[in-house]
């Protein structure tokens, strides 16, 4: 008998490790749509449609190559509802000589897979997932015994190793590693934003949309605006569209937020990268080629390469070298439940309303919206990391635990106590006001911190610093803020903190 080769929903690459050296005359490829994976958190409807539709297209593409494919559909009456159940059922039916899988993206699944050999009674080979630019052993070597893992140094090492945007003599192009000063301008006037290259749902996607509305009517999100690439060809076209039309504006507008413009100049490639429809070196090479052709400025190319070659690889390394303990870290002892407006968007805070509504409609928010609006509020208000992590894993179409967890625990909440970031990304309303047009349309006053109409980000910001003063006093990067706190007249600080306490008390009506 041949091998049973499992392909998970986020492993849709023809070059996948578990599909290599496949014997088409003897082996079977298994793809299983299972209830347990759709519901272990109540994923956004668009995310379920994306994964299931992409799986169906991928199964079709493998079958067209002449491979034997066993594709179990979600509504197949024989479906056992779990991955393990489907692997064991396939093993019973096909009696394979071995089971071949590629290392999964979640700790939970890796643990489960380690029990399959015994349950199935055949060898299970778990192969390295080499669709990343940094292997896990390589990351562990870099991390060594370091207590803090700074992305900047990892990124420079990656640039050198892969020779990306480098001079022949080993120095970075343009003489600097980082051009953030040229990126990240405050929002003033926005040039016309090229439309998102939305992919119209085909018959396969429409069938899955019906299925999802039937099976998961209560899950978060709407399906009307669904436009994610579900095939490799669509993903490649979407990348080309980004390079041609939005990349020139990427750096400059990277951190801006504008009402009614959910996508701005962003690449919209995370869903395709995380599913395996695009591979990270293709995306990095496209950026370098666009720069070398004179199509985009170096700052835009560098800013983008930093995200894909740097951040994306780095968070994966942090995840696998720190799990499972990383999941339960709560360095700031945050315990407050997640308020309902994270789901409904019904709040007077215009920034939060805009971000939650666009997330409901598109399963997307860009980096700064995730970090500095919903993330910053969760940090300042002391929302419990477990609930915040679950929210981030549910609401975004690109969310898988390996990439979601470090971004939330480390970047947004500082729940890891500084393993990833040298300081928490805490900011008052002034930051949001500088980078967006949200405050103009807000019921709260961004210039006020103590009054009843004060922007909650302001009162919470000072309250947060005061609450954690002892912890942060020694942090050189927070010294100016702690200094400002200490210079504040005591009556003013107590008025601000009293206002923060009242606001938190009535959080559900915020
Ligand atoms: P662009 O802004 O155009 O960036 C290009 C690419 O760089 C992205 O597609 C992504 O692959 C990569 N990238 C950029 N920043 C990061 C980062 N911090 N970590 C990993 N990859 C990065 N990204 C996810 O893919 N899944 C998540 O679940 C996720 N959760 C996040 C949670 C928080 C609190 C924060 C602050 C960030 C999170 N990110 C996550 C990172 C980032 O916000 C998204 O990758 C990005 O918004 C996706 O949109 P884009 O493709 O248009 O990205
Ligand atoms: Fe958000 Fe405050 Fe600005 Fe309102 S005033 S949009 S709450 S930052």
Image: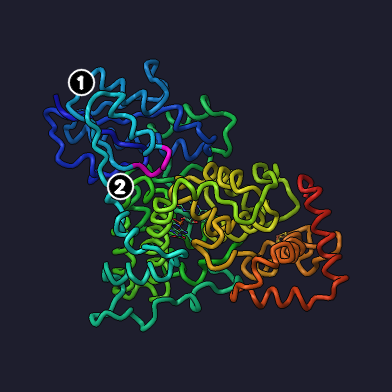
The residue at the far front in this view is: 145
Q: Is label 2's Cβ within 8 Å of ligand 1? A: no
Q: Main secondary structure of the magenta part?
A: loop
Q: Which mark is residue 95?
A: 1
Q: Secondary structure at mark 1?
A: loop
Residue 100: image location, x then y, percent: 23, 35
Q: Kindly tell me whether residue 62 is visible in this rendering.
A: yes
Residue 201: image location, x then y, percent: 42, 38
From what the image shows, is residue 178 above or below residue 84?
Answer: below
Residue at 32%, 61% in the rendered image = 141
Q: Residues within 10 Å of mark 1 (few under 14, many from 20)?
A: some
Which image quarter: residue 247?
A: bottom left
Count up the numbered dots: 2
In this picture, residue 359 sits left or right of residue 336:
left
Work out how far the residue at label 2 is from the one at label 1, CA to CA, in angstroms: 35 Å
* Bounds of the magenta segment: 104-108
From what the image shows, is residue 159 above or below residue 509?
Answer: below
**Residue linked to disc 2:** 233
The residue at the far top in this view is: 77
């Amino acid at each position: 008998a041949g091998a049973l080769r499992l392909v998970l929903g986020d492993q849709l690459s023809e070059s996948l490790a578990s599909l290599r050296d496949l014997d088409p005359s003897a082996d079977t490829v298994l793809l299983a749509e299972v209830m347990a994976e759709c519901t272990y958190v109540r994923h956004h409807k668009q995310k379920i449609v994306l994964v299931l539709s992409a799986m169906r297209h991928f199964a079709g593409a493998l079958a067209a190559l002449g491979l034997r494919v066993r594709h179990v559909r979600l509504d197949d009456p024989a479906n056992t509802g779990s991955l393990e159940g489907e692997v064991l059922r396939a093993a019973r039916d096909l009696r394979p000589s071995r089971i071949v899988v590629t290392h999964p993206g979640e700790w939970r699944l890796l643990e489960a897979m380690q029990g399959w050999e015994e349950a199935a009674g055949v060898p299970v080979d778990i192969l390295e997932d080499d669709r990343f630019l940094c292997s896990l052993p390589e990351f562990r070597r870099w991390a060594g015994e370091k207590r803090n893992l700074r992305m900047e140094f990892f990124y420079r090492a990656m640039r050198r190793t892969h020779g990306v945007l480098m001079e022949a003599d080993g120095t970075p192009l343009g003489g600097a590693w980082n051009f953030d000063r040229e990126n990240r301008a405050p929002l003033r006037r926005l040039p016309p934003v090229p439309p998102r290259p939305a992919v119209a749902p085909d018959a396969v996607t429409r069938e899955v949309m019906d299925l999802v509305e039937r099976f998961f009517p209560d899950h978060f999100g709407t399906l009307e605006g669904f436009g994610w690439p579900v095939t490799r060809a669509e993903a490649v076209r979407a990348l080309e569209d980004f390079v041609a039309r939005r990349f020139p504006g990427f750096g400059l507008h990277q951190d801006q937020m504008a009402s009614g413009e959910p996508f701005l100049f962003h690449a919209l490639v995370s869903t395709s990268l995380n599913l395996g429809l695009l591979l990270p070196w293709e995306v990095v090479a496209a950026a370098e080629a666009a720069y070398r052709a004179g199509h985009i400025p170096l700052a835009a190319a560098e800013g983008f390469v930093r995200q894909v070659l740097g951040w994306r690889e780095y968070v994966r390394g942090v995840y696998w070298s720190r799990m499972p303990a990383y999941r339960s870290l709560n360095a700031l002892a945050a315990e407050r439940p997640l308020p309902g407006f994270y789901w409904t968007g019904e709040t007077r805070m215009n920034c939060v309303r805009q971000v939650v509504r666009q997330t409901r409609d598109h399963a997307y928010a860009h980096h700064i919206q995730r970090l500095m609006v919903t993330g910053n509020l969760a940090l300042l208000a002391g929302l419990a990391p477990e609930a915040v992590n679950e929210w981030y894993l549910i609401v975004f179409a690109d969310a898988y635990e390996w990439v979601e967890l470090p971004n939330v625990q480390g970047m947004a909440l500082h729940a890891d106590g500084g393993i990833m970031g040298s300081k928490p990304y805490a900011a008052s309303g002034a930051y949001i006001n500088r980078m967006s047009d949200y405050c103009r349309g807000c019921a709260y006053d961004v210039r006020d911190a103590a009054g009843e109409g004060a922007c909650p980000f302001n009162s919470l910001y000072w309250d947060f610093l005061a609450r954690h003063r002892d912890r942060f006093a020694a942090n050189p990067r927070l010294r100016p803020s702690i200094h400002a706190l200490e210079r504040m007249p005591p009556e003013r600080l107590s008025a601000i903190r009293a206002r923060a306490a009242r606001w938190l008390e009535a959080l559900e009506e915020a």
